[in-house]
Amino acid sequence: MLFTKTFSIAAAALVAIASSLVEASPIPNDAVSEYVPLSKRSYTTEEIEAHERIQKRSSIGNGWDNWLYMAPRFVAKGYCVFSLTYGELPGIPLLAGLDKMETSAAQLSVYVDKVLAATNTTKVNLLGHSQGSLMPRYYLRFLGGASKVDKYAAFGTIAYGTTLLGIYPFLTSLGLYDPIKKIIDPFCKSCFQFLENSPFLQNLNAGGDTVPGVSYKFIVSKFDQVVTPYTNGQLKDKSALVQNVVLQNLCAVDLSDHVLQMADPIVFHAANAFFDGAAPQTVNCLSALW
């Protein structure tokens, strides 16, 4: 099995707002099986039992479930796909993505190095969802990731945080922000890092929201109920290496929200077009049919 010089890596966590994916380089077409729709797949008893064990741990957003749709499709396109569960807290074994994103970024750094060593290559491509659109940016900016990443695509993006449908400013106006944060912090150190204008985001975005040499494609949805306003998911860097895409500009009738984007064929084709210049570059409503 032959690989080219660029690999991609997917990092996925066990909470809805914390997941990302990694894919790798094309291999010969005759070595890749066709993508099989979920409705036509069959699973062994062992695979079903393994899935049920994962479901008992968390209902959404883990490394298996988060990429159940996209990972097989990338494999069928000739990519080698890796995923990482990050951000687990001591004493909370059932969920991940809860630790500070600085800590999760360090875990991603170690994981990328392992993928590079295992594949004997020099760079990866990153695909992220939700926290996977934010935490890897810390890795790129502060932990040396810029020299190891070629392209970075993400959807359900949180570039400038969320107001959580206005709940965050409402709690602040009532003086309840600090008391609630004090209660939640021990169990979810990353939760308040997602909020608009958090110290984490101010530090991450100071001096620009991208790093030189890495290509970015951030996909947002007008119907994202987690990232509000949805425009907070867009990068502000105007570099030619940065693409901000509104999902509804690709297909006006696409109603995917924050979670449904991870099973959206239009999102998949938009990411694949970004990673592979030989893939069809026109992505629209018809892309949902193939």
Image: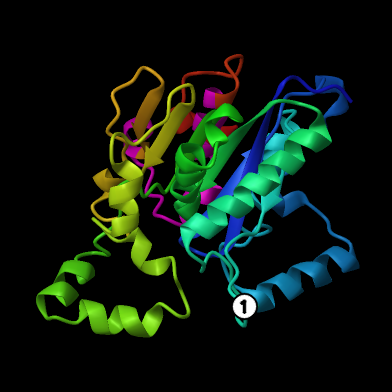
Quadrant of the frame with the N terminus: top right
Image position, residue 208 (x, y; %): 30, 34
Residue 50 sits above or below residue 78 on the image: below
Q: Nearer the viewer, residue 64 or 36?
A: 64
The residue carrying pointer 1 sits among few (fewer than 14), some (14 to 19) or many (20 or more) residues within 10 Å by Cα, namely: few
Q: In the shown orientation, is residue 254 left or right of residue 97?
A: left
Q: How many marks?
A: 1
Location of residue 185 (image quadrant): bottom left
Magenta segment includes 272: yes
Location of residue 258 (image quadrant): bottom left
Image position, residue 282 (x, y; %): 46, 20
- Label 1 residue SS: loop
Query: Which residue is rendered at x = 54% and y = 51% of the image?
Result: 105
Query: Which residue is rendered at x = 80% and y = 23% of the image?
Result: 3
Magenta segment includes 80: no
Image position, residue 117 (x, y; %): 79, 35
Majority SS type along the magenta span:
helix
Colour scheme in the image?
rainbow
Instruction: Please name the amino acid that badge 1 sits on.
Output: Pro
Query: Which residue is rendered at x = 47% and y = 54% of the image?
Result: 131
Task: Report the span colored magenta.
Answer: 248-274
Quadrant of the frame with the C terminus: top right
Residue 159 sits above or below residue 183 on the image: above
Look at the image and tell me whether residue 70 can be seen: no
Which residue matches tag 1?
A: 90
Image position, residue 127 (x, y; %): 56, 40
Look at the image and tell me whether residue 165 can be seen: yes
Residue 165 sits above or below residue 157 on the image: below
